[in-house]
Amino acid sequence: MTGMEIWNNPSCSKCAAARTALDEAGVGYALRPYLDRPPSAAELAEVLRRLDARPWDVCRTQEPAAVALGMADWPRDEAAEPRWIEAMVAAPELIQRPLLLLDDGSALVGRTAGALAEALRRTAATPGTGAQPGLVTPGSAVTPGSAATLPGAATPGSAATLPGGVTPGSAATPGSAATPGSGAEPGPGAIAPADPPHLVG
């Protein structure tokens, strides 16, 4: 688990503050670029349920798209909720940010220091969440369960080359006179050192 998912706008200062707070606390997270990958109406409705909020609670009614629609004057009752949701799905810049979707099933709007502190508290209280040093880099876009390679570690099944040019499991003996791939047979000690293994960052 990563700890949480952030609905992130890279140009938003509040999103940057949330990422910094999580990085400093060592909490892993996955970023969702919601402007490029807008939620469906069902997804947004589920996030609202997790927030225990109504659509207008997380709508940026001062955005040009909202002003053009006159959303500040729209009804704010149960019957009007689908209309608000559809407008935010069509123009995702209307959705407040950053939204923090925690692994415990809850969600927060992470725009204040208090909200970020609460997100960290809930993440710490959820077994199995949080950053795992060496596995997930806080702030990276690594998807949980992906085959991220640890620094300095060989990928299982790969032909990582050991210093001296010997591949694990090969029949070559360190210090032998044969240089792999060459036609020459220089004497012992003349073997050119192999390039260091390529590390995946």
Image (tube, rainbow, N blue to C red):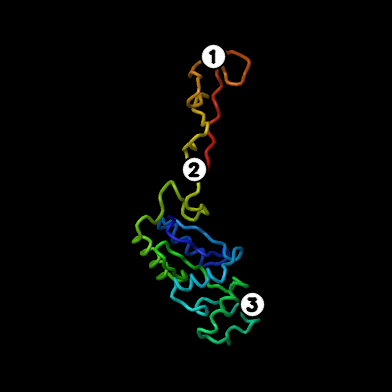
Mark 1 lies on a secondary structure that is loop
Q: CA distance from mark 2 to mark 1?
A: 34 Å
Residue carrying label 2: 149
Give the residue pinned by disc 3. 65
**Disc 2 and disc 1 in contact, CB within 8 angstroms:** no
Please state the horizontal and vertical placement of residue 114, each as a whole percent of the image. Answer: 40, 71
CA distance separating discs 3 and 2: 43 Å
Q: Closer to the camera, 155 or 13?
A: 155
Mark 2, mark 1: which one is toward the viewer? Answer: 2
Amino acid type, label 1: Ala
Q: Which callout, 2 or 1, points at the residue further toward the start of the chain? A: 2
Specify the amino acid type for callout 2. Thr
- What element does badge 3 sit on? helix
Q: Image quadrant for the N terminus?
A: bottom left
**Mark 1 surroundings within 10 Å by alpha-carbon count, few (fewer than 14), some (14 through 19), many (20 or more):** some
Outermost residue, right direction? 68
Q: Is residue 79 left or right of residue 22?
A: right
